[in-house]
Image: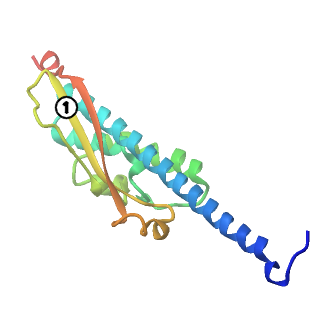
Amino acid sequence: MVQTRHAEGQALIESCIVIGMMCLLLMGLFQLVQLFMAQEILDYAAGRGARAKTVGFNDFMVSKTVRIGAIANAGALMVPERSGGGPWVQWTRHESPRIPHYLQSESWELDAILNYALWDTIAWSYPASDADILHFEVHQAVPLMFFSNVFKAFFSGSAVPMQGVADIENHYSLYLQ
């Protein structure tokens, strides 16, 4: 095959374009997986909140239960501060032991026990509490955490509004007779 002077380097340029497109595709796939995981976590948090509501817990306890259920969507740990070690060391020594204490605490103690950057973005609701089937919803604007500058070309904002839903039979009347 005879190459002309004008074709030199064409394969290199084509390879760079293909590699760039492959990277963009893989970054998009990675972001979609992150959003799928966030949806699963919101569904889990809605299930935990619905269960807490059906057995008669007050709204404050339901709120704490939903927050604990959504820890994986809660962003960076604010309290307690990181003290070295990897993520597993951080979880087993500092975060996990504080969860029961967090659930037993009063509202004025909560932020000093356990706090995450995005916990304030998590909201929940249950439209009709006296129905036989409790419909429970958890809402969060999930931020695009990975490659957010790249995805600003495709999304108008830096967060995707998501909702987790759980429907459960209302049992509180059996427990609170």
Give the residue at x 46% y 66%. Answer: 148
Q: Where is 126 relative to 175, above or below?
A: below
Give the residue at x 34% y 37%. Answer: 43
In the foreground, 36 or 103 = 36
Give the residue at x 22% y 54%. Answer: 108
Give the residue at x 42% y 60%. Answer: 144
Residue 54: percent from the left, percent from the top? Answer: 20, 26
Q: Where is 144 relative to 55, above or below?
A: below
In the foreground, 115 or 151 = 151
Element assignment for label 1: strand
The coloring applied to the image is rainbow
Image quadrant occupied by the C terminus: top left
Q: Residue furthest right?
A: 1
Left or right placement of residue 119 versus residue 16 in this view = left
- Identify residue for label 1: 135
Residue 5: percent from the left, percent from the top? Answer: 84, 84
Quarter of the figure with residue 48: top left
Total number of numbered discs in the rendering:
1
Q: Estimate how packed mark 1 is, as few (under 14), some (14 to 19) or many (20 or more) residues with alpha carbons within 10 Å.
A: many
Quarter of the figure with residue 172: top left
Amino acid type indicated by mark 1: His
In the foreground, 22 or 125 = 22
Residue 118: percent from the left, percent from the top? Answer: 35, 58
Image quadrant occupied by the N terminus: bottom right
Residue 66: percent from the left, percent from the top? Answer: 29, 41
Q: Residue furthest bottom?
A: 5
Quarter of the figure with residue 40: top left
